[in-house]
Amino acid sequence: MALRNGLASLLRPEDSVLVLIDHQPYQLANLNSHDPHMVVNNSAALAKAAKVFGVPTILTSVVEARGGHIFPQITEVFPDQEVIDRTLINTWEDPKVVDVVKATGRKQLVLAGLWTEVCVAMPAIQAAGEGWDVTVVTDASGAVSTEAHEIAIQRMIAAGVNMITWMALAAEWQRDWARAKTAGPLNEVVIQHAAGSGIAYLWEQQLLNTPLPNPAG
């Protein structure tokens, strides 16, 4: 397996396409690898970060009529976008999804979904074998157990798939805080979804905007 290193290996918003897979109530009900609240929060943060950077984002569900609608925290980010509903468990075997991804002309394929060991691992392994540069966002995904999540990650790494978390991905997309067009909106996502980091940023702004006491009285 070729090592993934060098500047060209970092993710770029202009080359990325994001596919969010099966963030649905049925899958969330048996999510045991993570706190379910965290997965909802992180998947929404990932969707918002993609929107900040103009990364094309495909939303897909499996048998929505029984499994439920994609989390509203995600669909509200893309209110006019159709969710592609599938019967195939492996998203990458469904031409409706693959054709939309290919139409973007991008080769850095970013995936997140429920569950890691099934609906993320299958398309990640297949797409990597077909020559795509595949990255999985681990903390916007989750599995039926911690073991299932960890084994799926090991299996995907062995297949040449890159792993990342949503904040690390956002940092790679931003790359330079001088890029003011996205720096401000990204900070808003951090404030809303990054807990300690967001609160620390607000505190920093408070301190910077607090006048020093006048020693002369």
Image (cartoon, rainbow, N blue to C red):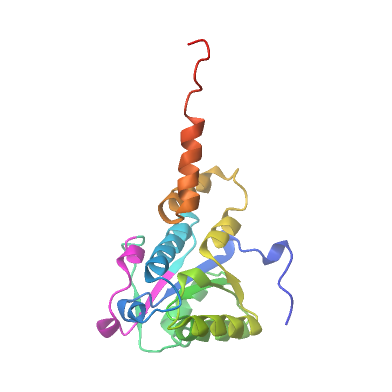
Where's residue 50, x and y in %? 47, 60
User: Is 41 situated above or below 88?
Assistant: above
Identify the residue at horizontal 54%, vertical 43% (top origin): 180
Q: The N terminus lies in which quarter of the figure?
A: bottom right
Where's residue 69, x and y in %? 29, 75
Is residue 185 at least partly visible in the picture?
no
Where's residue 161, x and y in %? 61, 78
**Residue 68 painted magenta:** yes
Identify the residue at horizontal 54%, vertical 58% (top origin): 170
Q: Kindly indicate the quadrant of the structure image that contains residue 107.
A: bottom right
User: Is 108 situated above or below 154?
Assistant: above
Where's residue 18, x and y in %? 49, 69
Q: Kindly indicate the quadrant of the structure image that contains residue 169.
A: bottom right
**Residue 126 painted magenta:** no
Total numbered badges shown on the rendered structure: 0
Identify the residue at horizontal 74%, vertical 65% (top origin): 6
Q: Kindly indicate the quadrant of the structure image that contains residue 119.
A: bottom left
User: Is 156 situated above or below 80?
Assistant: below
- Bounds of the magenta span? 58-76
Using residue 115 as the reference point, say whether residue 137 is left or right of it: right
Q: Nearer the viewer, residue 91 or 27?
A: 27
For the view shown, which residue lies furthest in the top direction? 216
Q: Nearer the viewer, residue 129 or 49?
A: 49
